[in-house]
Image: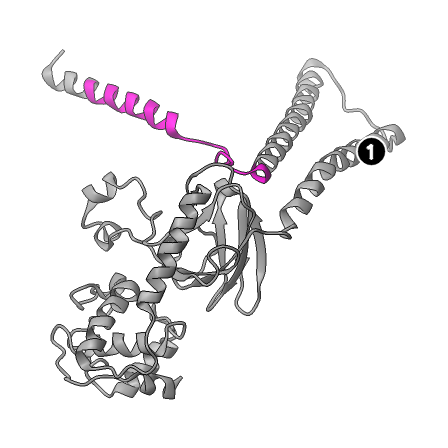
């Protein structure tokens, strides 16, 4: 065998073994459930799939047997008949019995899915294009609020860092802030949205609920094991739909209590004094943090944006123009573009972000935007 032929054979062998390994990782089923409700759904799914398979084999097996056994080439003639009461009764009763047999366990599971009463902890999940906002409304941790955004680096998303993307086990499935809950507790999730329809979906926790603007929907889960569980928005909510993951971190009760304490201290430290007089430097410092949390994914740390996708803020006519125009743009967004409304941010946060952009990179306006200016244009 020539050296060239040997290389081709070796490459084919490597491809074969790689394919076998890849197939071993490929799954054609639901994620392994982590809740009692999830196990019910998983078992129901398995039972229905098996029944459907048996029906498929039985019906098509009989059909192919009848066609083959009674084919014209072996001398069979087509039978002529009209109506058969026994057959008609059979093909009506058998499917009806099957449907009733499936409806009984399915109805019980659906009733359990909808029973969100007596929850130990209630969290509101608000969908935004494209991130999630969380508010702990009832139970230990009440008053905690935060936003959770995709933390996958933009370079991996754009394909300029292929090595980093390939080495990232949680590519497009990691967030900068996790939803933290205690193990063994019933968690009620209230869902809504600020712009378009989203859906809060974590398969391993058997929870999926649409988040509809102007409405409050609810669902629940009770995690049985400590760990991190990942999900995504399951509704086509716009061009960045695939970039708003959900990460739920389930902790032991003691660890959860410690997390709540840390979050409450952080909230106190970050609380803005309503009587504070903001200087240009104070606003820039605070605005840099707000920009990093809300704007950097599109407009980049350099302010140069992504050519062809997101405009540069450095040297922008809007950023360097009248303040009122920029405030209105950030409050209301721009229809037909990826620029969303940011009304959910406070007057201080918006004023700080605007001040930061107007005095960073190539922008040197030298002016500060006061929270009162934002408030006046809401």
Q: Position of residue 209 (x, y in %)?
A: 55, 54
* The N terminus sits in image quarter: top left
Residue 37 image point, x, y percent: 59, 40
Secondary structure state at the residue bearing disc 1: helix
Residue 306 in the magenta stretch? The answer is no
Classify residue 80 as left or right of residue 187. right
Quadrant in the rendering for residue 85: top right
Residue at image position (25%, 19%) is 13
Residue 35 lies within the magenta run: yes
Task: Indicate the quadrant containing the C terminus: top left, top right, bottom left or bottom right.
Answer: bottom left
Residue at 18% of width from left, 21% of height from top? 8
Q: Quadrant of residue 290?
A: bottom left
Question: Is 346 above or below relative to 234?
Answer: below
- Is 61 on the left or on the right of 201, as rendered? right
**Residue at the location (19% across, 79% down)?**
358
Q: In the shown orientation, is residue 202 left or right of residue 43?
A: left
Question: For the image shown, how many numbered marks are present on the structure?
Answer: 1
Relative to 106, residue 329 above or below = below
**x%, y% of residue 66?**
70, 21
**Magenta stretch: helix, strand or loop mostly:** helix
Residue in the foreground of this view, choosing between 290 and 225: 225
- The span picked out in magenta is 10-38
- The residue indicated by pointer 1 is 93
Residue 235 in percent (x, y) is at 48, 55
- Closest to the observer, 172 or 8: 172
Is residue 191 placed above or below 162 in the rendered structure? below
Q: Residues within 10 Å of mark 1 (few under 14, many from 20)?
A: few
Q: Residue at x 19, y 18 (%)?
A: 10
Judging depth in this view, the residue of 302 and 222 nearest the camera is 222
Q: Is residue 309 visible?
A: no
Q: Is residue 259 visible?
A: yes
């Amino acid at each position: 065998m020539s050296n060239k032929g040997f290389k081709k054979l070796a490459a084919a062998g490597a491809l074969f073994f790689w394919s076998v390994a890849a197939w071993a990782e490929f799954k054609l089923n639901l994620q392994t459930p982590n809740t009692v409700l999830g196990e019910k759904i998983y078992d129901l799914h398995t039972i229905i799939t098996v029944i459907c398979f048996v029906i498929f084999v039985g019906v098509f097996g009989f059909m192919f047997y009848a066609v083959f056994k009674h084919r014209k080439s072996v001398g069979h003639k087509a039978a002529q008949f009209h109506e058969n009461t026994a057959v008609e009764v059979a093909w009506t009763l058998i499917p009806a019995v099957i449907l009733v047999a499936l409806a009984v366990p399915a109805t019980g599971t659906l009733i359990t899915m909808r029973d969100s009463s007596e929850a130990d902890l209630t969290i509101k999940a608000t969908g935004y294009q494209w991130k999630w906002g969380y508010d702990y409304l009832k139970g230990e941790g009440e008053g905690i609020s935060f936003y959770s955004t995709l933390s996958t680096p933009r370079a991996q998303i754009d394909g300029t860092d292929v090595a980093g993307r390939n080495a990232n086990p949680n590519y497009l499935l990691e967030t900068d802030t996790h939803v933290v809950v205690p193990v063994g507790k019933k968690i009620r999730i209230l869902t809504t949205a600020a712009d378009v329809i989203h859906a809060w979906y974590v398969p391993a926790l058997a929870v999926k609920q649409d988040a509809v603007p102007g409405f409050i929907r609810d669902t629940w889960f009770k995690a049985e094991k400590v760990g991190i569980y990942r999900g995504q928005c399951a509704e086509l909510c716009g061009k960045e739909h695939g970039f708003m993951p959900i990460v739920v971190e389930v902790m032991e009760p003691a660890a959860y209590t410690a997390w709540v304490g840390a979050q409450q201290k952080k909230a106190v430290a970050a609380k803005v004094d309503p009587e504070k007089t903001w200087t240009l430097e104070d606003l820039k410092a605070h605005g840099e943090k707000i920009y990093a949390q809300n704007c950097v994914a599109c407009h980049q740390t350099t302010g140069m944006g992504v050519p062809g996708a997101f405009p540069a803020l450095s040297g922008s006519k809007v950023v360097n123009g009248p303040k009122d125009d920029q405030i209105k743009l950030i409050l209301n967004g721009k229809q037909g573009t990826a620029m969303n409304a940011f009304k959910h941010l406070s007057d201080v946060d918006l004023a700080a972000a605007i001040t930061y952009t107007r005095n960073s990179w190539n922008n040197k306006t030298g002016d500060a935007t006061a929270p009162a200016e934002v408030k006046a244009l809401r």
